[in-house]
Amino acid sequence: MVMTNLEWFRTFKAIYEKGSMTAAANHLMSSQPGVSLHLSSLENHVGYKLFQRRPRLLIPTERGKQLYNAIVDPIKRLEEIEMKSQRGPAEDRPTITLGMCFETFQQSLEAALPDLPCNLILEFGDYRELLHKLENRVTDLVVSPHNPELRGVKYEAFSQENIVVVAGKGTRPFDFQEATVAQRLKWLNEQQWYGIAGDNDHTQRFWKQNFNQAPNFRPNYVVPNFNSILRSLARAPGVAIVPDFLCRESIQNGEVSIIWRGDKPLTNKLYFARHKSSPNESALQLIMRQIRSAMPPPAE
C-alpha cells in the first residue's frame, strides 16, 4: 500500500498557492516533472482530482479546496520548524531524524522545539515504513505502537493508547451496555463516520476485537489526520475510532465524548525504537524525556 508522503502535501500547497506547475516548481526549487509526479501520486492516493487542468493554469476542485484548508496551517508550522532547526553552527548541534505520528508530535514535542539542543528532522507516516528506515539508519528514533524484532534496534515502552469510539456534537445517544450486538452494529452503521486517509488500522483492529469481523462500511468523510476528525466532530454529529489521549482536550472542552471503549478494550503500548548504540545518545534521551512527560504512562 502506498503511504502518504509529506512532500506530496508540500507540493500540493505550492501548486494551490502559485496556480501552475511551473510556478510551483520554481518556488520549491524542483523540476516540473517532479512536481507533476507528486501531484499525481497524491491524487491517486486520495482517490479524486484536486485540480481542473487548464492551459498553463490549475484551478482547485472543491475537494482540492477542502484538502488545502485542512493542511495549510500544519504545513506552515512544519516549514517554520524546519527553518528553526537549521539555525546555529552545525558543528555544535547534532541532527536527529525522528519518525512519529503527526498528532503525537503536536501533543508532546511541538511546543518544546525551540528549547532542544539539536537540529531535528521530522518524518510522519506509517510506523512500518518508519521502522524500516530506522533499521537502515535513515532515522535515529521512532515512536511506534509495535515492537517487531529488527537488526540493531532496541525498544523501550513509555506510554499507551486506548482505542475508543467517540461521538461529535449532537450525536443521538445510545446505550452500548444494554444493547445487543446486533443493535450495536445497526446503530453504528447508521452514523456518519470519519476516517483517516490511508490509515484505518485502529478501526479494523477495534472492530475485529469486539465484533469478530471487519467493518462493513466506509467512512463518509476521509480527512488527513485525527485532529481534523476532532475539529469536525466538535461542530456536527458523527463518530470515529481514535486513540483516547488525542482527544483529552476535546473531551474537557465538551466538544466530543467517548461513547464506547469496547467490551474487549483495545490498548496499544507505545515504544521508543532506536539503535542499540548512537553517538547522539544524550540528545535522544532529552527528546525521549520531553515526549514521555507529555504522554500517559504505560499500565503496570
Image (tube, helix red, strand yellow):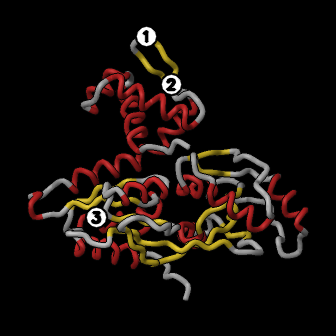
Q: How far apart are marks 3 and 2 (CA)?
A: 35 Å
Which of pointers 3 and 2 lies earlier in the amino acid sequence?
2
Residue at image position (90%, 62%) is 182
Residue at image position (40%, 77%) is 292
Q: Which mark is residue 51?
A: 2
Q: Residue 55 carries which label?
A: 1
Where is residue 221? Give x, y as percent.
Answer: 65, 45
Q: Distance between the residues labelled 1 and 2?
A: 12 Å
Residue picked out by circle 3: 113
Front residue of this view, candidates 139 and 43: 139
Residue located farthest toward the front when viewing the structure as drawn: 151
Residue at image position (42%, 32%) is 38
Dot 2 falls on a residue whose secondary structure is strand
* Amino acid under disc 3: Leu
* Amino acid under disc 1: Pro
Dot 1 falls on a residue whose secondary structure is loop
Image: 101 above or below 161: above
Front residue of this view, candidates 207 and 16: 207
Image: 91 above or below 221: below
Which of pointers 3 and 1 lies earlier in the amino acid sequence?
1
